[in-house]
Every structure is written in C-alpha cells, then in structure tokens.
Image (cartoon, rainbow, N blue to C red):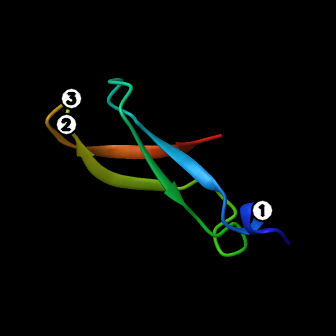
Amino acid sequence: MPRNDLRPVIKLRSTAGTGFTYVTRKNRRNHPDRLELRKYDPVARRHVAFREER
C-alpha cells in the first residue's frame, strides 16, 4: 500500500457549526470508522466534538 492509502490526511470539522477544522492523519487499518475527538474550538471558545469529514 502506498503511504497515502494507509495513513490518509483527514479533516476534523467542529460540530458547533463554526466551520473551524483541524487536520490530522489516521491509520485506516486500525480505525476504519469515522473519528470523533473533543478538541478546543477557538471560534466558539470551548471544547466541542470534532468529527471526521471525507
């Protein structure tokens, strides 16, 4: 598998509706489902859930 297929770059978009995103990588073999993390949203000025968008 090429490098980009195993660990693709993904965007994490805020669920607060602010449009703020984080960019990260994930291992598709270990985590095939969509990623959801609680991270800080500077626009909303609080921690919110960020979901993976494709």
Q: Residue at 70%, 63% (x, y): give it.
A: 32
In the picture, measured across the screen, residue 2 lies left or right of residue 43, that is right
For mark 2, does the 10 Å Cα neighbourhood hold few (<14), some (14 to 19), or many (20 or more) residues?
few
Residue at which label 3 appears: 43
For this orientation, the residue located farthest to the front is: 3
For mark 3, does the 10 Å Cα neighbourhood hold few (<14), some (14 to 19), or many (20 or more) residues?
few
Of the residues tagged 1 and 3, which is closer to the observer?
1
Mark 1 vs mark 3, CA separation in Å: 32 Å
For mark 1, does the 10 Å Cα neighbourhood hold few (<14), some (14 to 19), or many (20 or more) residues?
few
Residue at which label 2 appears: 42
For this orientation, the residue located farthest to the right is: 1
Q: Which of the 4 image quadrants contains residue 14?
A: top left
Q: Nearer the viewer, residue 3 or 32?
A: 3
For this orientation, the residue located farthest to the left is: 45
Q: Position of residue 30 (x, y in %)?
A: 66, 75
In the picture, measured across the screen, residue 42 lies left or right of residue 1, that is left
Q: Residue at 49%, 56% (x, y): give it.
A: 24
Q: Position of residue 36 (x, y in %)?
A: 46, 53
Q: Amino acid at mark 3?
A: Val
Which callout, 1 or 3, points at the residue further toward the start of the chain? Answer: 1
Q: Amino acid at mark 2?
A: Pro
In the picture, measured across the screen, residue 30 lies left or right of residue 35, that is right
Residue at which label 1 appears: 5
Rendered position, 42 above or below 9: above
Quadrant in the picture for the C terminus: top right
- Give the SS element for disc 1: helix
Q: Residue at 64%, 70% (x, y): give it.
A: 27
Quadrant in the picture for the N terminus: bottom right
- Give the SS element for disc 2: loop
Q: Amino acid at mark 1?
A: Asp
